[in-house]
Image: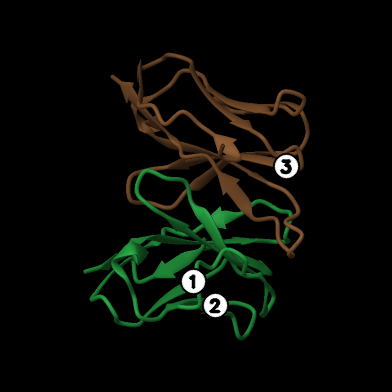
Chain colours: A brown, B green
């Protein structure tokens, strides 16, 4: 079992829909949780960064963290064709060897159809 | 200010050759990470620098891979005797401190023929 599980999709939704993206994890030591957006052949772009359980909102994006269930979500409201990309969840914990390296899910490929 | 930059954006080489990939982090960011991303996968950690020293190199796959950051800013990832399995996107990220958000560069796409 991988430390971070993420359904790779693909996920296709009509423009204006609410999108829900999810990851589960097995390592209870994870403390920091992130969502990145990656367009084809580009580097990941940070969307959301959270530390504690609960919700965090930024514009059309809401990140949820449930540490008791080891489950994180990203919601996108009023989805746009420009949101079409791969969404990567990532999380980190003290590695014991000196870093807070990120552990990523495989990414979910999202297409928003006009 | 400028984000993380990486050069070259694409590198094609032949099996057995030596390559260097460069990362220029965001100014003032002391923490620097290298990751490798294969097609259809999430990035995987390679090495972490805090300042000039490699504080955590536990993700390097073997001794053909080496990285330096001599002045605590620009970093170079070096791969000796490249193999076809080294073909991937190599990503660099920097952050203000080891627990802060990591910001990624555009990556270098390495192809080993």
Name the mark on residue B74: 2
Q: CA distance from mark 1 to mark 3?
A: 27 Å
Classify the position of the C terminus of chain A by image quarter.
top left
Find out whether the residues at labels 2 and 3 contact each other: C-beta distance under 8 Å. Answer: no
- Looking at the rendering, which quadrant does residue B94 occupy? bottom right
Judge by depth and name the residue closer to the eye, A65 or B15: B15
Q: Are marks 2 and 3 on the same chain?
A: no
Quick check: can you spot residue A62? no
Could you tell whether B82 is left or right of A72 in the image? left
The chain ID associated with circle 3 is: A
Judge by depth and name the residue closer to the eye, B32 or A100: A100
Residue at (48% x, 51% y) in the render? B43
Circle nearer the viewer, 2 or 3: 3
Residue at (64% x, 79% y) in the render? B72
The chain ID associated with circle 1 is: B
State the image coordinates of residue A15 (x, y, percent, origin top left): 36, 17
Kind of element beneath mark 2: loop
Name the mark on residue A30: 3
Find out whether the residues at labels 2 and 1 contact each other: C-beta distance under 8 Å. Answer: yes
Residue at (58% x, 38% y) in the render? A4
Position of residue A83 relative to residue B103, above or below, is above
Q: Earlier in the sequence, mark 2 or mark 1?
A: 1
Could you tell whether A27 is left or right of A80 in the image? right
């Amino acid at each position: 079992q991988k430390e971070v599980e993420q359904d790779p999709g693909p996920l296709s939704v009509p423009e204006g829909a609410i999108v829900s993206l999810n990851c589960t994890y097995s390592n209870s030591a994870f403390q920091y949780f992130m969502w990145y957006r990656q367009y084809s052949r580009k580097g990941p772009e940070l969307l959301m960064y959270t530390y504690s359980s609960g919700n965090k909102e930024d514009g059309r994006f809401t990140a949820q963290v449930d540490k008791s269930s080891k489950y994180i979500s990203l919601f996108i409201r009023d989805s746009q064709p420009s949101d079409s990309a791969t969404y990567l969840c990532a999380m980190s914990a003290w590695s014991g060897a000196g870093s807070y390296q990120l552990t990523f899910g495989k990414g979910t490929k999202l297409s928003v159809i006009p | 200010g400028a984000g993380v930059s990486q050069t070259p954006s694409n590198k094609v080489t032949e099996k057995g050759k030596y390559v260097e990939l460069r990362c220029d982090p965001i100014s003032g960011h002391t923490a620097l990470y290298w990751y490798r991303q294969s097609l259809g996968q999430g990035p995987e950690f390679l090495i972490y620098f805090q300042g000039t020293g490699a504080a955590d190199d536990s993700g390097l796959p073997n001794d053909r891979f080496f990285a330096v950051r001599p002045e605590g800013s620009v970093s170079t990832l070096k791969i000796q005797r490249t193999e076809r399995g080294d073909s991937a996107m190599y990503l660099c990220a920097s952050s203000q401190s080891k627990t802060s958000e990591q910001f990624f560069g555009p990556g270098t796409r390495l192809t080993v023929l």
